[in-house]
Image (spheres, grey):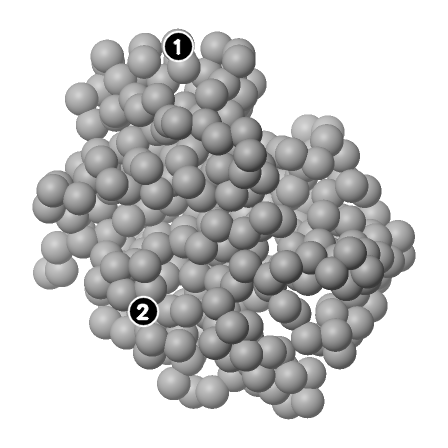
Amino acid sequence: MMNRKYVIVTAAYNEAAYLRSAVESVIRQTILPRRWIIVDDGSTDDTPGMIKSYACQYDFIQYLHGSRDESRSYYARNVHAIMEGIRQIDDLDHDFIAILDADIILPDDYYEQILSRFEADPGLGVASGIYENMVNGRLQKVLSDRRSTPKAIQVFRCACFRQIGGYVPLKYGGEDTCACVMARMAGWKSWSFPELKVIHCRPTGTGSAKGILRARFRQGLCEYGLMTHPLFMIVKSLRRCVLERPWIVGGILRLAGYAYGHIRRESCQLPSEVAKYLRREQLRRVFFLSMMPTRNRVEGGA
């Protein structure tokens, strides 16, 4: 059997309303992490006290006070905090690195199930389940792509994470997409498993945007920051108009955010070779109806 030693890193900023549920879901895992680094990214609520309290109760939980830099964007600060946490476990024996947002509730066997997927496919470099948003007490489905893994619940094989150099901090986010693309460029597979569902305690993207409409606009800015191909962006936005809340206007706002990035001529922080590879993949998806090369598929996946 494969070594199933893994660590978790969480960056938390003012997450007191959600952190307790996230911690309790990790404590219930059928396979516990060797270490869980929770980085307080300069919270002004009770987040630090909650982390310290749990760290006193569970020896695998470690509190880390992050060095918050206000000159960075919200998304870049989050990546900086995660990478700070990862540096804390460099000397710890582990084979997998899990990234977990502080507003996620996991099923009890989430990491056991993810690690079994890695065991079944040695070429799998980064994997995740999918999440559903909790909105007004009800779960809402989130559109997902089998080749993309959301950072909120992402798990890396250590060899893959080291080879790609970890996350690239981007002004408007998308570092999880960038990591998946770099993994595929390096010959690894990235895959999300829809049968593994977790609960996201608030709508995707609203942690910093303070509202779903602004979140959709910022997601368009994120696409621009990733150098998404214009044709792919148009097709994606039209699809989101009919498949994602808020209907119609959400897709339009995505496209508006993307266009705004062009108007402002925002600088691209994505490595040029990664942007070119991503655009080639996107055009293939447009012209070949989202089909992907067999070498990039995980067995049993659609």
Q: Residue at x 20, y 27 (%)?
A: 60
Residue 265 shown left or right of residue 281 in the figure: right
Q: Secondary structure at mark 1?
A: helix
Q: Position of residue 249 (x, y in %)?
A: 88, 52
Q: Position of residue 294 (x, y in %)?
A: 43, 87
Residue 124 is marked as 2
Q: Position of residue 127 (x, y in %)?
A: 39, 60
Residue 149 shown left or right of residue 25 in the figure: right
Q: Nearer the viewer, residue 25 or 126?
A: 126
Marks 1 and 2 sit apart, C-alpha to C-alpha, by 37 Å
* Residue highlighted by disc 1: 49
Q: Amino acid at mark 2?
A: Leu
Residue 226 shown left or right of residue 114 in the figure: right
Q: Amino acid at mark 1?
A: Gly
Residue 55 shown left or right of residue 174 in the figure: left
Q: Are marks 1 and 2 in contact (CB under 8 Å)?
A: no
Q: Secondary structure at mark 2?
A: strand
Where residue 35 sits, quadrant-wise, is top left
Q: Nearer the viewer, residue 88 or 20?
A: 88
Q: Residue at x 16, y 48 (%)?
A: 94
Where residue 61 sits, quadrant-wise, is top left
The earlier-in-sequence mark between 1 and 2 is 1
Q: Residue at x 24, y 52 (%)?
A: 96
Q: Residue at x 57, y 83 (%)?
A: 280
Q: Is residue 238 above or below residue 8?
A: below
